[in-house]
Amino acid sequence: MIVSSPLYLILLLGLVVLASSLKAGAPRAALILFCSYAYYLTFPIAFFPILVYVVAVAYCGGLLIERLEGSRLKSWGVGAAIVLCFAPLLIYKYILPLASTSHRVVGIDWQLTTQTFLIPIGLSFYTFTAVGYLADVALGLVPVERAATRVALFCGFFPSVTSGPIPRAAHVLPQMDFKREFTAERGMRATTEILFGVVMKVWIADTLGVTSSAVFNDIGGSSALEQLVATLIFSFQLYADFAGYSLIAIGSARLLGIDLPDNFRQPYLADSITEFWRRWHVSLFTWLRDYVFTPLRVRWRHWPQLGTSSAIFITLLLMGIWHGAGWGYVVFGTVHGLLLIASQLTLPRRNLFLARLRIPASVVYITRVPITFLIVSLSFILIRASDLDQASRIYRNIFNRRLLSELSDLFAQVHDSALAFRHISLAQNWLDLALVSILVGGDLVARRDNFSFLQLPAPLRAACYAICIFVVFVHGVSDNATKQFLYFQF
Amino acid sequence: MDLLIKVFADTLGVDPATLSDDSSPDNTVRWDSLRSMHLVAAIEDAFSTELSTAEIMRMRSIGLARSVLRKKGVLDI
């Protein structure tokens, strides 16, 4: 069951009503714990023991770390608990796929292997949640949790278990007693988040997906211009899909009295790669910042430039590999690591240069935003392409004179646009443009305050709600396996 | 003025009035991961102390930085 399906939304409403009728605290927590694990059981049952294992390691590991406090064995205990927590992720996401690839290399039939080793849904997300908890207990930032049910709820909370946002113990664990009462204000905000999330997924992401799939599934038969357009469209599809999911998850949790962390802060309005990573998949990036970048940077503090660059590179490489074991993800992480280092090294000189030219800050910002977006979009080819071969074919086509000649032909109207757009109809092009405009417009409105929408005049808000509900009814809420959230695969 | 807040404000280049014990990299625009090391160096200089990796990892907000320094015996903050 995916979170934009009609069944999920109906069950969520029922759960909110039932939970509100129960006494705040233990009874409510017990109900939500039961529902969270029942929800996870709607996915293949083989995934369930892995979630239970990770929760058990987090719970026992926390108790062990507390017992070893002050002992020389503490660091060994912390290391062992974290390795045991990471073990299923390493096995299912990296070791087994790599082993199956090596079978292919030696010529053994590995078809069965790849089908057997499905990655448990949400494994990367709940593993990072559990490891973050263990690290925070070890650092003394959160007290060890003695109730196993609270650790189980924290790691397996149904809105975030499959695709995040990755909750942090210091922020979310104290809320797991479910003592916060339902208020009209929270209800309004949560409902708006869920409605916007569903619209972003079922209307914007799924519609944009038609274009990107048509082109990416036939790279040999598509034009260079189409490949560039599909690449840009895919960036918006990925954003609408994942940010839509995150909004539904955040809204669902808020209805039950839990505030999950934000996951997106208008990423395509970023004016640098550094800024982009502060706005995209925020819960993953802050996790990596706190548990990977900071310790590395501190360890290498005596080599200021080299230490910072090395810590950035390793953090971004891990971010790439977090998405999967494929070479595309390794290259994606490497490219972003190098871009971030280059951005950090050159920013002071670039700023000085622009200051000397006396170019207004607003002009600099307006110029930088599309350049940053273009760089990010081009890097997403590494994630969207079926493999590195296909990605390199797309890059060769885009960075080719062929693209320029197709563009000039199109503008000169030498021939019909149908030659340049074989897979994307004119109507689809206009629809995509309209959807992208809505997405960017929404981000511009939310630029100063994520929820400035709720401060708009009531009639305007009512009109927006009506349009959203109409759109959802027309497009139908998504319950189709082919319309799964893109980030489910990670 | 609170010396710790002053150190943060001077290093981040922001108005001290905008900072409080709840300020963290998540709600303070200029407190990014790259400036964190400048903050560490500034805190070590201002309070004549040396911070370990674990202590720096604990300093996720000004309030937590204050608590780390108090545990190290820095009392006048």
Image: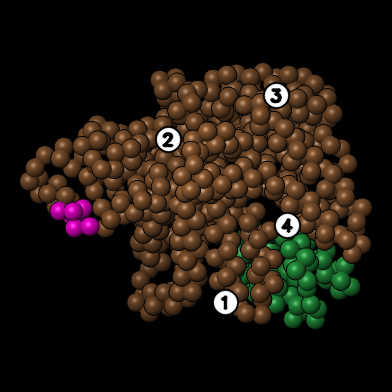
Chain colours: A brown, B green
Q: Which residue is drawn at 31% across and 50% down?
A: A394
- Amino acid type for the residue under numbered disc 2: Ala
Q: Mark 1 points at which residue?
A: A306
Q: Which residue is drawn at 82% across and 42% down?
A: A59
- Amino acid type for the residue under numbered disc 4: Asp
Q: Mark 4 points at which residue?
A: B22
Q: Which of marks 4 and 1 is in front?
A: 1
- Amino acid type for the residue under numbered disc 1: Leu
Q: How far apart are marks 2 and 1 (CA)?
A: 40 Å
Q: Which mark is residue A38?
A: 3
Q: Name the residue under label 2.
A: A205
Magenta stretch? A400-405
The x and y percentages for residue A175 are 77, 39
Q: Which chain carries label 2?
A: A
The x and y percentages for residue B38 are 65, 74
- Judge whether residue A201 is colored magenta: no
Q: Are marks 2 and 1 on the same chain?
A: yes
Magenta: predominant secondary structure element?
helix
- A123 lies left or right of A70: left
Q: Earlier in the sequence, mark 2 or mark 1?
A: 2
Viewer-closest of B54 and A74: A74
- How crowded pointer 3 is (Cα within 10 Å; few <14, some 14-19, many 20+) is rated as few
Q: Which residue is drawn at 32% across and 43% down?
A: A230
- How crowded pointer 2 is (Cα within 10 Å; few <14, some 14-19, many 20+) is rated as many
On screen, residue B29 above or below A246: below
Q: Can residue A120 be seen in this view?
A: yes
Q: Nearer the viewer, mark 3 or mark 4?
A: 3
- How crowded pointer 4 is (Cα within 10 Å; few <14, some 14-19, many 20+) is rated as few
Q: How far apart are marks 3 and 2 (CA)?
A: 28 Å
